[in-house]
Image (cartoon, grey):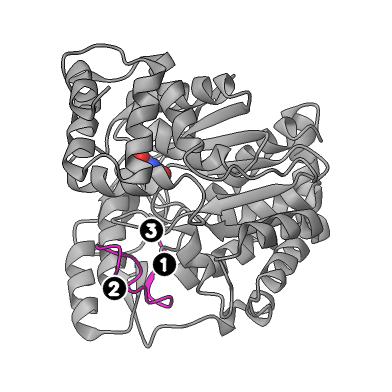
Amino acid sequence: MSPSSIIARKRDGHALAREEIIAFVRGATDGSWADYQLGAMLMAVFLRGMNAEETAWYTDAMMRSGTVADLSGIPGLKVDKHSTGGVGDKISLPLAPLVAACGVPVPMISGRGLGFSGGTLDKLESIPGFRTSLSLDEFKAQVARVGCALIGQTRDLAPADRKLYALRDVTATVECVPLICGSILSKKLAEGIDALVLDVKFGRGAFMPNLDSARELASTLVRVGRASGKRVRALLTRMDQPLGRAVGNALEVAESVACLRGAGPSDVMEVTRSLGAQMLVLGGVAPTEFDALARLDAALRSGAAFTKFREIVAAQGGDVRVIDDPGLLPRARLIEPWPAPRTGFVAAVDARAVALAAVRLGAGRTRAEDVIDPAVGIAGLVKVGEHVAAGQPLAEIHANDPAALADARALLAGAFALADSPVSPPPLIAELIAD
Ligand code: URA
């Protein structure tokens, strides 16, 4: 079974046997397949696809390419959330402590931002001292003690994905449902979870352009998750305008703290509560979504969710004073309002344009090695449906570099559309896909 014979079979449109898929993933892990062979195989899969069985075998082989954490010693069903990524998507920050405060252990392994989409680790690292690189043993110990840990991918979890994801990035093979499914689920299943809730985003600021493509990805993830013996549910959520009013790392931490204090923007709260309700049901602490929502709201009202976030930050070496007073978070030197050119109703806020402006300011990366500036970004964003008067700010640009500020202005120029008559935003949550 040589690499070229396996590549040829996929190139010619055959379904691969499990052993062939295992050989491919092993080749990516131990270096026995050359990068050009891995690249050719990825392109063959991209063009020919994988059936449900092949996708499940591929995901399983990717998961087993490294350590699979064993969290069975921690009482309760362990539930995580994964988002396919969006603009201003800070949901993990309020969600993880909220769900943990309701008694469901949350072992959460997250990524960094690349391109227009932000990353949970970058946001957390704007909290001075916060360590995202715990060892697997430290991670397990914290989940057992605190009920939640928020860390980055360790070297030993799903190493095949690290290799293949980097190759997909440079071989134009990222947008492929079986490859995305294997990549996302292998990392999540290797965390040792019992259940997973997915936020599959679609629209201008998402990786999936429309509802149909999001539904196809979500259905595959739910089906393959179930084939691996895990409960998986997915919400399909719209990502045409940024989530919340802030895009940028410290700015999003401040907004997350506001959510945990009961003063968050309504769209961030809606997604957080909806994902949280699914997590509590799958975690077995609430019989219905209705009961789950009541528990989540009680944890927000009592301050238990905020206290849990403080505990997580302290456990990971972060300075809790910035959680108590987000005014102490890193702050940009240049803050400039972006005024409305006329009076009207906000008809659109282009998430992608806002994200590109934030990346130019230094809030994100265009290459994996770029360094993030935690303070910069776009804040005070208006939301679709709101009324603005001429001259009133549509947003505030937070910059540390005058040249970047000028570029961000140019990128924001076409981001806002105003209408004369009232505009009602479409529902944020389009569908639930359950197993
Ligand atoms: N996120 C991942 O982790 N992998 C993909 O392939 C796409 C998004």
Q: CA distance from mark 2 to mark 3?
A: 14 Å
Q: Quadrant of the C terminus?
A: top right
Residue under the point 22% across and 77% down: 404
Furthest toward the top, the residue is: 14
Q: Which stretch did the figure color magenta?
A: 361-381
Q: Mark 3 sits on what residue?
A: 113
Q: Mark 2 sits on what residue?
A: 361
Q: Are marks 1 and 2 in contact (CB under 8 Å)?
A: yes
| Ligand 1 lies in quarter | top left
Which one is in front in this view, the residue at disc 2 or the one at disc 3? 3
Image coords of residue 386 (percent x, y): 42, 52
Look at the image and say whether residue 370 sits in the magenta stretch: yes
Q: Mark 1 sits on what residue?
A: 248
Which one is in front in this view, the residue at disc 1 or the one at disc 3? 3
Along the polypeptide, which appears first: circle 2 or circle 3? 3
Disc 2 residue crowd, few under 14, some 14–19, many 20+, Cα 10 Å = many
Q: Is residue 112 left or right of residue 170?
A: right
- Residue type marked 2: Leu
Residue under the point 64% across and 61% down: 263
Q: Would you say residue 271 is visible in this rendering? A: yes
The secondary element bearing badge 3 is classed as loop
Q: Are marks 1 and 3 in contact (CB under 8 Å)?
A: no
Residue under the point 21% across and 16% down: 9
Along the polypeptide, which appears first: circle 1 or circle 2? 1
Image coords of residue 130 (percent x, y): 59, 73
- Residue type marked 1: Gly
Disc 3 residue crowd, few under 14, some 14–19, many 20+, Cα 10 Å = many
